[in-house]
Image: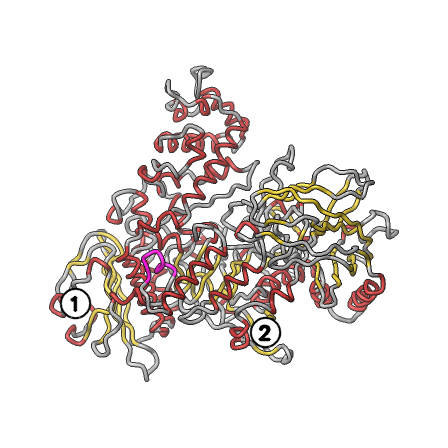
Amino acid sequence: MVATVSNSKQVRFVEDETQSLVAWADSINRSDATYFNKAQKLAHRLGAKYRSDRLTEIGFWTPEFAGDIIQSEHRLELEIFTPLDPLDFRAPQQTVRFQRDLIPITKQGEFVWAVIYGMQAGTRHQAGCFYWLRYEDADGRVRVIRDPLAYSLPYGVFAPAELYDMRQLQRRRADLAYFRQTGSSSSLSDATPPRVPAPTNILQIHVKTASAEGTLEGLTRIYQRISDKLAAGESLTPDESVYAGYDAVQLLPVEPTIEYRREDTHGDYEFFAIAPYDPDHDSPLTVTLRQPDTQNWGYDVPILGSGATNPAVLGSLRPDEVVDFIATLHNFSQGPIQLIYDLVYGHADNQSLELLNHQYHKGPNMYGQDLNHQSPQVRAILLEMQRRKINTGADGVRVDGGQDFRFFNPLSDRVEQDDAYLMAMSDVVQTIQGCRRLMFTIFEDGRPWPQEGWEEISRYRELIELKPNSFQWGPLIFAHNTPTLKGFWDRKWRRACEVIFQGNRWITGCGNHDTVRRGNQVALDRDINWNLGKTLPQVLHTAYNSPATQIWVQGFSPGLPMDFLNACVGAAWGFFRNTDDRYGVKVVAEEVGFLDWQVEPERYARSETFPRLKQLGFYDLEQLRAFAKALQTAMEETDYDLDAVAEICRHCLGADANGYCEIPALEDLNEPNLSHFLATLDVPKLKSFAMAFMEDGHDLCNVARYAEDIDPNLSYFNLALRNFRRRHPWLQENLTGRDRFNRVSDDRRTIFYGLRTCPDQANAARVAMVAHMGGEPLPLDLEDWLQIDFDQWQIAIATPDLLGLDQAQALRSFVLHDGQGILLEPRGPVALAQSEAGEGS
């Protein structure tokens, strides 16, 4: 897509409008409101806003300059870049001329303000002006201050932000009728807006691996095709059905992530690289623009720009692409599909130290930096980021790491949870074209994590008790979920019972981004359940998409089930990111289990897989596994010292090996046909190996690679289960005294079974369930276990290999194997047959 360039105007500072803006800000500061209320009002007007009169308001919070005695002490100016050539936002790389303007800016306490005439606003088809603040430090070096509240960052967090016409974007969105139907009018400002109701089930998606394109527009095409086929009464293919049957989609974080940085130079890989120029001449600048290609699971965020969307998931690099996707979901032919954002405000990556002023940070933690939520202005800005994010059209938010929001309270002299901030996140009001709503809210909170033994003592209820209309991740969906091991579900019986009797406000399920990654880390000497498959990848994919587990979760259990797209497809998954220079090898050392648990030799042998590693000489999967594990050992024994690891490699590999090798596994690789790459390892080559591993692994996780491998029977079975739950929304509620949930368990097998009745007396619906959760086969006497008469019951849904069990006599005596299960319902109006699953939404 080539963006046009409007007729160039002279960019200039508008004195009277700027003074009006400063006077408004001054009136806020002088008011009797609380510090936080003042901060909220000021935060609302920070960033760059393109007004209806075509002027642009600019506001930055710059506490680092509040002590300047005179206005010009730091020569703070607004630097504006106006494109003089058309921009092709789909070009991998292009060189563009820009007009550069330096505009004075007015300081007011900790803030700077300006109103500018002539700035070009970006639209779907037009590139906007790019901007940031610049100043010279005491040593005469030019520094820049980027906009934390930017709406558009097409070239990443280290580039200047793009001014964008958000008013036009909102006016032209295709789902305005949906917001008028589900929201309240902004004219009723004193009334509490309606909260978006909870969905029935959720599909969790990582955008970069969820379509062949790896973008939101790729997902838009998939959902539009499914919507059109269902509207026309056409059946879905197996690879389409994995997206269907959900009334909510939760995206893994789509905030801008950290970017690849090196200490020596940035110009050869920066996304917005300004060529050297003479600042005393008024000639156009030359800028090399590179389309962002960052790969990340989403949680490594610098916080700056969190109200915008990661440009790496935008094929067009335009914010309109986000709105197009959301509108496609809201206008889905079988009924609206909600969009849930996964928000990361509990920590920041260390890269944020380069991008934000020091007031944003409290100090280091295991992820990078703690954020200073106790600063009124930081608190207000973070909530304003969230408001701008949800104003793209979201229906819900998932708050990542609620247990990480902590602070030291001097009044109690102890560290406390900042639950007030978490509640405030749930109560941020969305406003779209005069329609106001509150978001459906999910909290991920495993307190007292990371305290030792947290897996067994966490309650997972603190936040749903504070906010009863919210949901919280339940105990069986957290990262310690390892169903590949024998006896897992028997060991989790206590937690399973908690789900059954108090889980109505829990997110339930088995496979998600955290648990599948944890599956990659299971040691190979553990007691693996080989009933699930003949190879480790088969075991893992069956474990996290087990028909028996799905029968129990979707067909019987309370709560709100969530599935993970990669688990549903049987696609690979791991935590891969190509954003590391310093820590890339360390991350690879933590992910080597991916090669055992996710990669079959036949898939590795395909010419299109692992091209970068093969180019380095790793043509054999076993050799790659051996080197990766030896590298992991070396990293652990040297405390992740790359120089020390490189020295060990020189001792152990190649012609210069001196006979002494600290890592025997490396010595075993030193054969006559050793590749030149391995024979000459040094720190740069270790880093290049890490980058190749990350990018090849990420590519393997794209679900489009597995479309032809999807089992159609399993795909349609899971869709039938989702449709069954949507027809029985009462299943979300906890079991009552009239219901039953039991197990048959010994050291050889674990069977779950139960009977439920709709709590609404006017609804006679009942459901019975049996699911083999692991171990050896067992002959069933289900009629006796459940105390029901099979002549009065029929199969609603059975796992794919039990489709022949449709007679009462057969049900009275059959053998149930690992992973099998059935749902029963009373005879009467015939439930949708499993064969109809392909027709469901």
What amino acid is found at the position of numbered circle 1 in the picture?
Asp
Residue in the picture at 37% in, 20% down: 673
Taking the image as drawn, is residue 111 in sight?
yes
Question: Relative to the observer, which residue lies in front, 123 or 7?
Answer: 7
Relative image position of residue 809 (x, y in whole percent):
11, 68
The residue singled out by tag 2 in the image is: 436
**What's drawn in magenta, residue-wise?**
236-243
Query: Foreground: 431 or 335?
Result: 335
Q: Is residue 223 left or right of residue 639?
A: left
Tell me the quarter of the picture where residue 21 sits. Answer: bottom right
Q: What residue is drawn where x is 77% and y is 58%?
A: 111
Q: Position of residue 471 (x, y in %)?
A: 47, 66
Work out whether residue 96 or residue 526 is closer to the camera in this orientation and state it: 96
Q: Residues within 10 Å of mark 2 (few under 14, many from 20)?
A: many
Residue behind mark 1: 806
Residue 589 in sight from this viewpoint: no
What is the distance, in whole Å, between disc 1 and disc 2 at their CAs? 50 Å
Q: Give the amino acid type for the residue marked by disc 2 in the picture.
A: Arg
Q: Residue 749: which quarter of the image?
A: bottom left
